[in-house]
Image (cartoon, coloured by chain):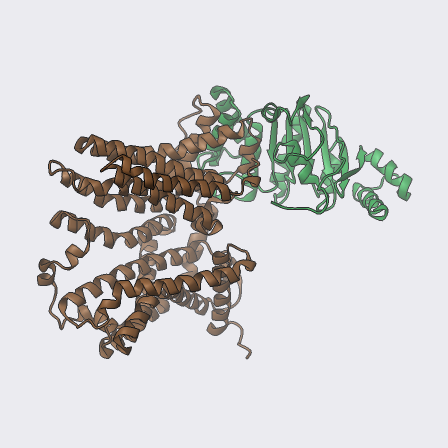
Chain colours: A brown, B green
Amino acid sequence: MTVQVGTAVWFAQHESRLAWRDWLSMITAGRRERLRKVAIGIAAFIIFMHFVAYWVVGRYADAVVDKQTLVAVTASMLLSWLLMISQAMESITRAFYARSDLDLILASPVATNELFGVRIATVALATTMMALPLAAPFINVLIALGGWRWLGAYGVIVAMGAAATALAVGLTVALFRVLGAKRTRFVAQVVAAVIGAAFVIGLQITAIMSYGTLSRSAVLQSDTLLALAPGMNSVLWWPARAALGELFPLMAVLAVSLTLLAAAIAIVAPRFGEYAMAAAGVSHAGAGQARRSAGFGKTSPRGALRRKEWILLRRDPWLMSQTLMQMLYLVPPALMLWRSFGQGNGALEVLVPVLVMAAGQLGGGLAWLAISGEDAPDLVATAPVPSRFVLRAKIEAVLGAIAMIFTPLVVLLAIASPRYAAVAGVGIVTSSAAATAVQFWFRSQAKRSQFRRRQVSSRLATFAEAFSSIGWAGAAAVAAISIWLSVLPALLALLVLAGAWYMSPRTQHAW
Amino acid sequence: MKRFDRPAVDGLDLTVRAGEFYALVGPNGAGKTTTLRMVAGLLRPDAGTIRVGGIDALADPVAAKRITAWISDEPMIYEKLTPREYLEFVAGLWGVEPPVAAARSTELLDWLDLAPHADERCEGFSKGMRQKVALAGALVHEPRMIILDEPLTGLDAGSARQVKTVLRDRTRAGGTVIMTTHILEVAERMADRIGIIAHGRLIAEGTLEELRRQAGAKDGATDGASLEDTFLALVAETAQAA
């Protein structure tokens, strides 16, 4: 079938082909021969997720529609929806700023309204498709155990994807209008990261303040919330009722969401080119004005390298948003720490592994940026500095940043319990050093802008980094109770590191 | 890492004198960039020796790098740094004394018309401006030898002229410049000597006149033939021999 050039269908074909190839390249790390292995991996993951789903939601398959169920389902949906908004905002921001084909499209004689409409619809589709593989095992289990009424949950996912995209488009355009093209990119990336984390963290903070626990279910199952929640007939529960299989709420939720998406497309698509051109103007002409350098201070080559790494880390908006999110996750434990003063050390035991785990994750990200994400590798390699000094300076920069972030928390912890502070301190240093070591062993030259895809470039490194952090967090948790018992998880973490080192591509470590 | 069936460079014997402007030309994939990357200390040869300013670059790479600067065709600078910060960083890497580095940076930024943008981040710069920032970085530590890989690719006429002027001034001041280029007119006009490389081997070397004679001996090229004619004749001869 021949599709007429320049029509929405033609654009949709073009967009879907690009999206498919982009996804394929991401999932296979650019190596098509991996496709079979990746397909097997995905299939295994889906099967595994069905077991997880059975364990988590199997007992709710015959759930009756009462207020407690509605609160729990609504909260879960709200959390997923916020994550979808975050994902959609990321995509929309990228569509404005980072699409290399915008010049070609805007310079072509075709009506761009339809293309940009299709592009927004593609974001909605991609957002939905990202959520489906995660939600599908849970829905399938509920259908298998509770009947066809649960099929409505698929419709709710579609509605959530459409509404999340509509809201993300609205938010991004509002930011564009209020802040201008120059600031929107940074703010939108931060907002997208924060939105995703805000709901969980908000619930945890409420739980800590009200019940002295990190568990969010304490809030969701509390009598106070049930009393405050609106009546059973409220429209607020329609999305939850739709997910529970009620037909009319499902139709209503779908209609409202799709109308919102259609309205967003109708309003924004005609102006999309205008926004894209404003964004392009920023990247071409609006070089960010930086504070004038204080002057050429006396520094060693290592000092110069450290300083450069810190400036780059500070000025990287995407990294800032990632770091901010990591820091946001530290807010509940910090709050709990503050509440625990003078109330014994029970709650503090939870904090030590949380801090150690966060340090490992943050250390891994920063180490990738410093070691692999070097934008001027030739310059550094041709400098009259031995390569071991370069690496040492970069590792110092990473550990310095970790120290700056975690020292205040450890100091605070030391006031409550010097022993826990010592364990946390050692754990933070070990966990971040281990993550840095993994990134060092698996280093491969990349642009900093590829940070999003660092997990895909070496899955082995990603898993090693994660399991090492988990191992050290476990060791720290046990060490808070008994130093001797912590030897076992520490040995496991060391084993992970040894395995990672053994499997690392050492032959390529030439620079 | 790329793997090759044959060595990218094989049996190459190249000598560039101090104060000389040397242009290395050759077809795509001839081994020009590989040669320069080895001299700059970015690649290690499987065999052979490299001496830079009398220093054994394989035995003491740090000392060799101290007197060398490398600029690639794709200027790699930090998007989030300003030109001034970039120069400060490069000066720090090469251990230039701060007052000297500050004075040289100001001078270079003025000279390359970058002063109005000295405190703007490089992320919005055009390729020409990036190339100028990279060039300023290469000059801030006063190298005795500058190695450039296709430095004029993608530059506008004004920027290209500025770069050429800078390079000529360097050789007049006693510095050495080694450059690869596909723009044969530039090599013809600027270089003291030209080396032609093909299939990883140096097939001819000398002044333009000497190259014409070599080509004439093989191909009957006339006096006054352009470098382009001479180059094509010599490369064709090598291809036939291969």
Residue B130 in view in this figure: yes
Q: Report whether A309 appears left or right of A210.
A: right
Query: Residue at horizontal 72%, vertical 37%?
Result: B24
Residue A362 in view in this figure: no
Q: Report whether B88 appears left or right of B162.
A: left
Above or below — where is B151 with respect to A18? above
Residue A505: x %, y % from top left: 53, 43
Residue B115: x %, y % from top left: 49, 33
Q: Report whether A82 appears left or right of B186.
A: left
Query: Residue at horizontal 40%, vertical 44%?
Result: A465
Residue B182: x %, y % from top left: 71, 43
Above or below — where is B87 with respect to A56? above
How many numbered discs, if any?
0
Depth check: give the residue in front, B9 or A11. B9
Residue B166: x %, y % from top left: 63, 31
Q: Report whether A492 appears left or right of A23.
A: left
Query: Residue at horizontal 45%, vertical 28%?
Result: A304
Look at the image and tell me in which quarter the N terminus of chain B lies.
top right
Query: Residue at horizontal 26%, vertical 41%?
Result: A477
Depth check: give the residue in front, B39 or A421. A421
Depth check: give the residue in front, B191 or A367. A367
